[in-house]
Image (cartoon, rainbow, N blue to C red):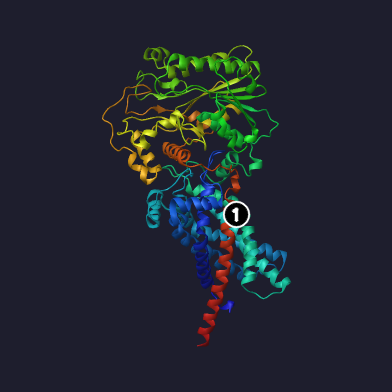
Amino acid sequence: MAGSRSQGAEFVLAGLAACGAITLTNPIDVVKTRLQLQGELAAAGGKAYTGIGQALLRISRKEGLRGLQRGLSAAYLLQFSNVGCRFGAYGSLKQLFGVKPGASATDSLSSMLLGAASGSLAAIVSNPFFLLKSRFQAAGSEDVLHQHSHLSLRKAFCEIGQLQGFRGYYRGLTAFVPRVAAATSVQLSTYDISKDCILRYVQVKDGVAIHFVASLLSGIAVTMAMQPFDIVAVRLMNQPHKECGSGLLYSGPVDCLKQMLEAEGVLSALTHHVMSASDPPWCVTGGSGFLGSWCVKLLLEEGYTVRTTTRSAEKAAYLKRLPGSERLTILDGVDLLTPGAFDDAIRGCSYVLHTASPFYFKGGSEEKLVTPAVEGTRNVLNSCRRLGVKKVALTSSTASVYTNYGKLPADHVYTSEDFSPEDVLREKENWYCLSKLLAEQLAWSMSKESGCPFDLTVLTPTLIWGPMLPGQPHMNTSASSLVGYMDGSLKVIENACKTVVDVRDVAKAHIEAARNDLGGQRFLLIGGSPHFTAVAEYVRQALPGALQANVPSELSSELGPAVMGPAPPLPVLYDVSPAERLLGIRFKTAQEQVEAMVKSMLDNGFQRSDQYVPDKFGLYKGAAANYVRFGPYCTLTFVFLEQLRLAWDRGFSAGAGC
């Protein structure tokens, strides 16, 4: 009695079938959304989710069943409106134009076009619910660039309308319409054609088995067709927006696609920065250090051959557990103060990242800090000059930029043009800051000498936070600044702001500075200047419940002296736009830095962290999760729909016979 079913009934039945299917497959949809958003616009770096199974376990452990079913209410609205419109409109259009899928090549093509048309209509109707679903599913993720803190579906719907107007409900429509059109044109036509071919050539009875096989084939086809549109739509809808309404990250689907291809690639084999082992190796000095280890990690992930130096083989042993470490050579016992000590590491290299330098928060002396920094830099650059290195990226510090003890106005905006006054540093016996300033001055002087073969780029990061690598055997000095907030040894919160930057951003900046034509430039690297009250709260949120009580809540009544920039509690004002523009750095927030650092400290202290497997699938990021979700979802939708149709027809027949 199929002919007795109205298209209104088909709309309702299809919507109900889709709601039943999404109830069972929503956890995979949550995983798919987070895989597509994590590492957004990042070429490399550790990810919270490394695969479907691991992501399901991680979300269930950290967020419970509620986390796995995030966005389910919005998903119900999306499925009912979207699938109902798609199936209802598709059936009506087939009847209107007399199309029979599979009857001929023309009818098969026509069915695809009708599917695209019905999908476009469905996308317009359901776009607001896809927007809400994407935002709710991204919430709580550990590695998503931007999240929205909506308290409920109703409040989220009202909030979008109040803040962004009617247009707000149709964010990402230009990507969502092609996504649904592509999916529907392939899904419905493939299902119809597959089912028709099975019935015609296999000559079996119509039933659940045929629906199952046809829907599986449809799921495969639709996943491949809609995946590029899907990831673009998810990112456009999840991105933050300016007050004027335009996106902060992407101006539209074409811009989103362009940025993704540039930053993440289509497949790892096609990533534009991947190099073969036959290319000249890179040298990273101080590879066992916090920054050096991340430079090594990112270079290995991109396929480069790397040499690194360390004073202690034992301290650098954990680097051999990094993915790609078969391309890593560790030269131990290399002393900064020994001329020629770096020759073996640098020989044959085109690029050198010089990160090795002593670092102390307190204490030290001119002998311990200034001499090693200056003479070490001299020895490294002499080797670079003698061995014909092409590019050198040197790690300096904001210590050489704005350690002026309040000599400049509080509203001064610091740039790469600023330098700390040497006479003041000597007067205050600030040996660490003086060591960075003098080492940098020496490097610039040597790079300008006649016959110097290398281009020099200087990076001036502030205090570096972010995650330590798994297995790092020693706590880096910058991480120790948070220990007092974790173990309860600090009783009050420092009344000051602190400029900080993520180690992953600094490592990427070094690599980009070396391999691009940026010789002679100096880059300021700062990711934020939070007050320590915010830092304490970030630490508290990152700690397990039992440890949260260790974090102090009382603000210190004392104010420290002006050392770096204005007097506390005023923040340092800075301009890092050159690094954003020329190095492609999208600086991670202070909260992201703290959360990643605290987690890595706990992992390294109490349990062994699993190694990260690089995920560089770009446009097809989350495609496996998309199929694992869409295969069963597609199958369940069609099977449920066929059963609902049978039940409807039986009920209609019974009603007609009364």
Near mark 1 (Cα within 10 A), the count class, few <14, some 14-19 or many ≥20, is many
Residue 257 left/right relative to 74: right
The extreme bottom residue here reads 658
**Number of numbered discs visible in the structure rendering:** 1
Residue 268 is drawn in which quadrant? top right
Is residue 495 among what the camera can see?
yes
Q: Mark 1 points at which residue?
A: 226
In this rendering, is residue 176 above or below 144? below
Residue 440 left/right relative to 163: right
The extreme left residue here reads 557
The extreme front residue here reads 314
Q: Which of 419 and 67 is in front in this view?
A: 67
In this rendering, is residue 646 above or below 455? below
Q: Nearer the viewer, residue 22 or 518?
A: 22
Residue 163 left/right relative to 332: left
Q: Position of residue 121 (x, y in %)?
A: 54, 60
Residue 201 left/right relative to 465: right
Residue 109 is drawn in which quadrant? bottom right
SS class of the residue under badge 1? helix
Q: Where is residue 281 in the image (x, y as percent from the top left)?
A: 65, 28
Q: Where is residue 144 in the image (x, y as percent from the top left)?
A: 48, 45
Q: Which residue is depicted at the point 64% across and 37% down? A: 272
In this rendering, is residue 316 above or below 616? above
Q: Which residue is depicted at the point 46% across and 52% down? A: 61
Q: Position of residue 304 (x, y in %)?
A: 64, 33
Is residue 175 among what the camera can see?
no
In this rendering, is residue 141 above or below 290? below
Q: Quadrant of the N terminus?
A: bottom right
Q: Which amino acid does label 1 sit on?
A: Met
Q: Nearer the viewer, residue 135 or 52?
A: 52
